[in-house]
């Protein structure tokens, strides 16, 4: 089969981008330095000396936001990793997002063969990696259908009490006058909530221990030493990774067995999946459940932690918006128990979260691999091409969002962007399964934090945008815990956050 996307409209042109890109007032635009439309293959930078085309992946991985911004500014909407090659291409526009996200028969998720980490066949590590994100075609569709019921809106309401109790326990450990790393706190909170919602473990009843096991596994998975030295020799990170994988798999399997033997169904995703086996004749093997749950643990807490951290940081820098949001929270969530209906009646809260994820999307870029030849405009690409798209870049295109570098939640009260213009949760048939749950979780956590405390970024704090794929503050986000109150001033920040967001 063949996919095709036509170019639409004239190209726009913009400014050069340095190592720390300044923001053009109108947003990202394709540069006018040269017209590349006459080329028969897409433009791109020269291959790196000695290392060749794939050497260009090094600056991309080291600083993806800077590198993609430069590519878009210099070469436009369709760019190859290295001129003269089509192994990797970047596509920056709502139209190409539509092609990639909309045609699930043409573009596949990358599988374990594309991973830089050695994953032995038949190992616990392979089974832990075998979640929905590794599946394509009919297999993906059938497993997504099986996983969908626990994440539907009516089911999400049953998780609210658990989310609130875990959040309350975290906030009770804070103290006025204490200095915290907000990113680390949000990461711990989001992981504890994920464990509670997915497998029903309270922090004080085994949840904390399970969180530590997950954190140990994720730390070893993303260790450069595990990638560069994949040898099962005692003392090496890769040896510890394989041993921890065995331990984690056994722990998840024991939870599956406990739930199967248990009495009344609990309000957690695992119980609902097992209940679906009895009621809806949906059958997932225990090994498949292990892979799905492990992926949900990772995806469900890293992205939420990122979004909550950036949102609280942006509110600190925009005290008038923070004050308006406090008024809304007090008007809707004062005293009574939290419900889906009350959370849906917080338009400014939703606008603030949407705007935060537009400016600083938790997933800065994603990739797919084509399984057939396809066209973008006049360019033809072969089967096996890896196509990289970026929510960070799309969200800054001038024609999609006015004043795109400014934090303007009110834009969400005026109009809704198209589904392929705004993609923090992906788009199309593979839109993030946990979208409803993530929004409810973030609204509850944000409301409870703001009702209880003020979190203040100290003067001259340096915040650098970091992360390879999941955005995060590079060296954390230090905040001072202060009594709840209204803000009228803010402290100036330093760092590359000022290149990503107009804080003037």
Image: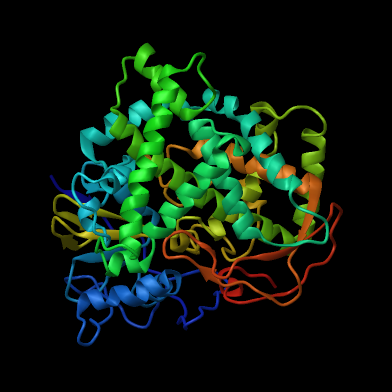
The residue under the point 49% across, 32% down is: 199
Horizontal side of 90 relative to 447 (left or right) equals left
Residue furthest out toward the front: 234
Q: The C terminus lies in which quarter of the figure?
A: bottom right
| Residue 14 rendering spot, x and y as whole percentages | 46, 76
Q: Please give left or right for residue 241 compared with residue 52 in the image.
A: right
Q: Quadrant of residue 176?
A: bottom right
Give the tally of numbered discs. 0
Q: Residue furthest bottom?
A: 49
Could you say where residue 272 lies in the image, as x and y percent from the top left? 45, 22
Q: In the image, is residue 447 above or below residue 119?
A: above
Q: Is residue 422 visible?
A: no
49 versus 26 height, above or below: below
The answer to whether 67 is drawn above or below residue 18 in the figure is above
Q: Quadrant of residue 328?
A: top right
Q: Is residue 171 left or right of residue 379?
A: right
Q: Position of residue 474 (x, y in %)?
A: 54, 69
Q: Which residue occupies 26% across, 47% down?
A: 126
**Image coordinates for residue 318, horizontal then vertical, percent:** 74, 61
Image position of 329 (left or right of 76) = right
- The quarter of the image holding the N terminus is top left
**Residue at x 39%, y 54% (from the top left corner):** 94
- Check the image and tell me how it is coloured: rainbow
From the viewer's side, name the closer residue of 251 and 156: 251
Residue 274 seen in the figure: yes
What residue do we see at 19% from left, 65% from top? 87
Q: Nearer the viewer, residue 198 or 208?
A: 208
């Amino acid at each position: 089969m063949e996919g095709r996307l036509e170019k639409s409209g004239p190209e726009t042109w913009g400014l050069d981008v340095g190592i720390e890109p300044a923001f053009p007032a109108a947003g990202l635009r394709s540069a006018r330095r040269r017209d590349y439309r006459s080329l028969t293959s897409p433009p791109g930078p020269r291959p790196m000396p000695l290392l060749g085309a794939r050497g260009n992946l090094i600056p991309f991985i080291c600083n993806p936001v800077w590198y993609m911004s430069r590519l878009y500014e210099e070469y436009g909407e369709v760019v190859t990793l290295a001129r003269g090659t089509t192994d990797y291409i970047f596509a920056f526009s709502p139209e190409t997002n539509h092609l990639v996200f909309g045609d699930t028969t043409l573009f596949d998720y990358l599988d374990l063969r594309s991973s830089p980490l050695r994953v032995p066949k038949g190992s616990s590590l392979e089974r832990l990696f075998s979640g929905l994100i590794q599946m394509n075609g009919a297999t993906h569709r059938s497993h997504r259908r099986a996983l969908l019921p626990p994440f539907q809106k009516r089911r999400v309401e049953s998780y609210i009490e658990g989310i609130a109790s875990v959040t309350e326990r975290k906030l009770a450990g804070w103290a006025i006058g204490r200095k915290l790393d907000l990113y680390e706190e949000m990461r711990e909170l989001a992981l504890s909530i994920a464990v509670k919602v997915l497998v029903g473990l309270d922090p004080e009843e085994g949840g904390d221990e399970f969180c530590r096991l997950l954190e140990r596994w994720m730390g070893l998975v993303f260790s450069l030493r595990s990638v560069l030295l994949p040898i099962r020799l005692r003392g090496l990170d890769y040896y510890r990774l394989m041993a921890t994988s065995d331990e984690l798999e056994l722990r998840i399997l024991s939870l599956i067995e406990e739930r199967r033997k248990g009495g009344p169904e609990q309000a957690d995703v695992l119980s609902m999946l097992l209940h679906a086996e009895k009621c809806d004749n949906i059958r997932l093997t225990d090994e498949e459940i292990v892979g799905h749950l492990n992926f949900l643990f990772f995806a469900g807490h890293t992205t939420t932690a990122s979004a909550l951290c950036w949102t609280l940081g942006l509110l600190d820098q925009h005290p008038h918006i923070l004050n308006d949001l406090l008024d809304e929270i007090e008007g809707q969530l004062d005293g009574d128990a939290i419900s889906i209906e009350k959370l849906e009646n917080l338009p400014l809260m939703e606008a603030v979260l949407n705007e935060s994820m537009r400016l600083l999307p938790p997933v800065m870029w994603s990739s797919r691999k084509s399984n057939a030849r396809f066209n973008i405009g006049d360019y033809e690409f072969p089967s096996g091409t890896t196509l990289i798209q970026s929510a960070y870049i799309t969200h800054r295109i001038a024609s999609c969002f006015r004043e795109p570098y400014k934090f303007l939640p009110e834009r969400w009260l005026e109009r809704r962007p198209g589904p392929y213009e705004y993609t923090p949760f992906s788009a199309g048939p593979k839109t993030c399964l946990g979208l409803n749950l993530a929004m409810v979780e973030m609204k509850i956590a944000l409301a409870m934090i703001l009702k209880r405390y003020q979190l203040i970024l100290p003067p001259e704090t340096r915040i650098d945008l970091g992360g390879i794929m999941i955005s995060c503050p590079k060296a954390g986000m230090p905040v001072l815990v202060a009594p709840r109150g209204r803000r009228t001033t803010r402290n100036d920040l330093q760092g590359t956050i000022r290149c990503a967001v107009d804080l003037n």
